[in-house]
Amino acid sequence: MIDRRWVLAAGLATALGACAGDAAAPKDQDGNPLEQLTVVTATGEHAFWVEIADDDEERQRGLMFRQPLADDRGMLFQFPEAAERGFWMRNTPSPLDIVYIGADGRIVSIARHTTPYSESTYPSNGPAKGVLETRAGRMDEIGAQPGDQIRHPFFGS
């Protein structure tokens, strides 16, 4: 005879396992999993799911021709070394906040509310190893300032 408690427990374990599988990282438009990144500000910790641009082709394309980002989304540009950086908005239809990040994961500077389609360069004003792009206004909403910490494995955190 089958113990009903065992059947119920096995069914519950299977259902919970299926739900845990649903908690997998969301994917970008190409089907690549997004990575978690946290911006730590005076107002707390703010989680984002980011696409990674870590080769020349991905960094060149960035968020060109893309729809506006959701509040919890972004793109993290990763460079092999920290250097003065400058980004522009060519072929980018939505305004962005561009966050320049030092090798230690600290925010160097923020270009807020950039102008769509602009070919003007937004400079980092200091060496940056990473650059985070988010929806325009998002950094103001979370209170991000230069010196605040970005947590992501790329910065050793």
Image (cartoon, grey):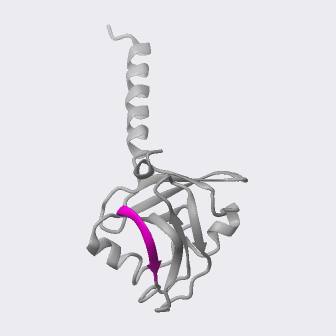
Q: Main secondary structure of the magenta part?
A: strand
Quadrant occupied by the N terminus: top left
Image vertical order of residue 76 relative to residue 23, above or below: below
Residue occupying image coordinates x 38% and y 22%: 10
Q: Position of residue 110 (x, y in %)?
A: 59, 71
Q: Position of residue 115 (x, y in %)?
A: 56, 88
Image vertical order of residue 148 relative to residue 108, above or below: above
- The reply to whether residue 132 is visible in this rendering is no
Identify the image quadrant of residue 78: bottom left
**Is residue 85 part of the magenta span, yes or no?**
yes
Image vertical order of residue 33 relative to residue 100, above or below: above
Q: 149 and 64: which one is in front?
A: 149
**Is residue 121 part of the magenta span, yes or no?**
no
Q: Residue furthest top?
A: 1
Q: 124 and 34: which one is in front?
A: 124
- The reply to whether residue 84 is visible in this rendering is yes
Q: Position of residue 70 (x, y in %)?
A: 54, 68
Q: Position of residue 21 (x, y in %)?
A: 38, 41
Residue occupying image coordinates x 37% and y 30%: 14
Relative placement, left or right, of 116 versus 15 is: right
Identify the image quadrant of residue 150: bottom right
Relative placement, left or right, of 94 versus 13 is: right
Residue occupying image coordinates x 39% and y 33%: 17
User: What's drawn in magenta, residue-wise?
Assistant: 79-87
Numbered label tally: 0
Q: 99 and 138: which one is in front?
A: 99
Residue occupying image coordinates x 44% and y 14%: 5
Q: 62 and 93: which one is in front?
A: 62
